[in-house]
Image (cartoon, rainbow, N blue to C red):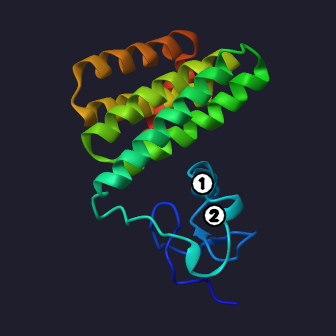
Amino acid sequence: MAPATTSCHTCGKSAGKLLLCGRCRNARFCNRECQRLSYQLGHRGANCHPAAGVQQSAAPSQPPTPTDAARLYQSYKDLIAEAKAASDANTRVGFLTAVDTFRAAGSVADLIGGVHGAGLRADTDQVLADTLFRLGDLAAAALAARSSLRSARASGSRTMLVAALQSCGMVALSAPGEMASAERESR
């Protein structure tokens, strides 16, 4: 069977072979992250059914409508609150749950786009780097810190840039080799 020519249910991209929702057999996703994000945004239960009931989100080349932007921002805030609550448990399971949720929030920030989305992404990646650092995954923490720095530069906020540099410095002090490796990977 040939890959579908439709676009991703979450981000609107239509590149390559798309994954098919196993339940409704209608929604398609470019990767597991988009599928997880779609689930977080409501593609489950009664919203996951075949035929014309599945709504496609706008393609990234089109700016989101005010209603979509408000929905995305609310989803972002909900994911951040959920991740912080999981992280506050101070357990390994809580931190691992927080990491997954922070990554989903980062994907929503990317969908928001623009300077505001870059600022949200910088903030999210900074907290993600701290959480990964607390888990002891220094390689992933270094990558998140570098991503935070890149997003902070894109946002144009000096405050976020300073916070991202502090996050990079925290990882670099503990694992300079990991930070250098993350810098090479991000180029």
The local crowd at label 1, few if under 14, some if 14 to 19, many if 20 or more residues have their Cα within 10 Å, is few
Residue farthest toward the bottom in the current orientation of the protein: 1
Identify the image quadrant of residue 93: top right
Comparing 58 with 44, the one in front is 44
Residue 110 x %, y %: 41, 47
Q: Considering the numbered disc 1 on the image, is that residue within a helix, a strand or a loop? A: loop
User: In which image quadrant can residue 19 be found?
Assistant: bottom right
Residue 112 visible to an observer of this rendering: yes
Q: Residue 166: horizontal and vertical position, in percent?
A: 40, 13
Q: Is residue 150 visible?
A: no
CB-based contact (under 8 Å), mark 1 and mark 2 = yes
Instruction: Indicate left or right for 110 with 182 as reference.
Output: left
Q: Amino acid at mark 1?
A: Gly
Q: Classify 122 as above or below 3.
A: above
Residue at position x 53%, y 67% in the image: 9
Residue at left offset 33%, top offset 32%: 119
Would you place residue 169 above or below residue 113 in this image? above
x and y percentages locating residue 84 in the rendered image? 59, 22
Left-right relation of 17 to 182: right
Q: Which residue is mark 1?
A: 42
Residue 135, placed above or below residue 105:
above
Of labels 1 and 2, earlier in sequence is: 1
Q: Residue at x 51, y 22 (%)?
A: 127
User: CA separation, marks 1 and 2?
Assistant: 7 Å
Q: Residues within 10 Å of mark 2 (few under 14, many from 20)?
A: few
Q: Position of residue 1 (x, y in %)?
A: 70, 90
What residue is disc 2 on? 47
Quadrant location, the C terminus = top left
Q: Amino acid at mark 2?
A: Asn
Mark drawn on residue 122: none
- Callout 2 secondary element: helix
